[in-house]
Amino acid sequence: MRKIFILSFGLVILLLIGCDKIVETTGDLGSLEIYNAVEKEAFSDEYVLDSVPLMTIDDIESYDWNKNFIKLKPSVLPESNVEDTEKQKTSQNIKIGGSRIFDTNSRDQFMIIVNDELIYSGYYNQSFYSSFFPVGSVMVDSEEGVYINFVSVEGLDLEDLRNDERIYDVLKAYDLLVE
């Protein structure tokens, strides 16, 4: 009788430990972070990832899956992400490229990371004054957030990874998707 009690008690403990681990793994909804990366050297193909993300899942108000538009929470947006007209008139204040929202430069890249795994990277939008023409995924500022467009050039075989299911799953888990 004592052996049956000890065996039963052991099974109950194992079940409780197993249930606790199931709750821990399913309780984690995942992570989505967007980082900026800067060139290691001028005109280099090597980039260094910033230590702090530009945005995380907590900064996103909604994500329009069909338009690839990330609507950011108002607290994340700068007071004005549109340069005033006086600055636009003088060529010395023209931003050649990058993001005004995140204060990045023309040759910087953004990197979409889900659950600590790089899904894809891309460049920021460029002005007409720039000689750099980004292809692939391109982040474009708007008043309420950013669009991630895909620019293709005939003859280049580029894969569009913006609609990766891992991104979709995390956004859905946080109820941020607009479809």
Image: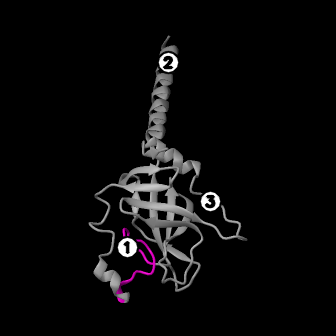
Identify the element where label 2 is drawn: helix
Q: Residues within 10 Å of mark 3 (few under 14, many from 20)?
A: some
Instruction: Check if mark 2's residue and mark 3's residue have beta carbons within 8 Å.
Output: no
Q: In the rendering, at what x and y percent does residue 141 appear?
A: 42, 66
* In the foreground, 87 or 173: 87
Identify the element where label 1 is drawn: loop
Disc ID at residue 103: 1
| For residue 168, above or below residue 94 | above
User: What residue sits 36% from the left and 52% below the top?
Assistant: 58
Residue at the far top: name it.
1
Identify residue type, mark 1.
Asp
Q: Residues within 10 Å of mark 2 (few under 14, many from 20)?
A: few
Identify residue type, mark 3.
Asp
Label whose residue precedes the other's in the sequence (3 or 1): 1
Segment tinted magenta in the rendering: 92-105
Q: Which residue is mark 2?
A: 8
Q: In the rendering, at what x and y percent does residue 31 appear?
A: 45, 51
Q: In the rendering, at what x and y percent does residue 132 appear?
A: 55, 81
User: What residue sits 49% from the left and 26% below the top?
Assistant: 15
Disc ID at residue 171: none
Q: Which residue is mark 3?
A: 160
In three-dimensional space, the C-alpha distance between marks 2 and 3, rounded to whole angstroms, equals: 54 Å
* In the foreground, 179 or 12: 179
User: What residue sits 49% from the left and 31% below the top?
Assistant: 18
In three-dimensional space, the C-alpha distance between marks 3 and 1, rounded to whole angstroms, equals: 25 Å
User: What residue sits 46% from the left and 45% below the top?
Assistant: 177
Label whose residue precedes the other's in the sequence (2 or 1): 2
Identify residue type, mark 2.
Ser
* In the foreground, 5 or 96: 96
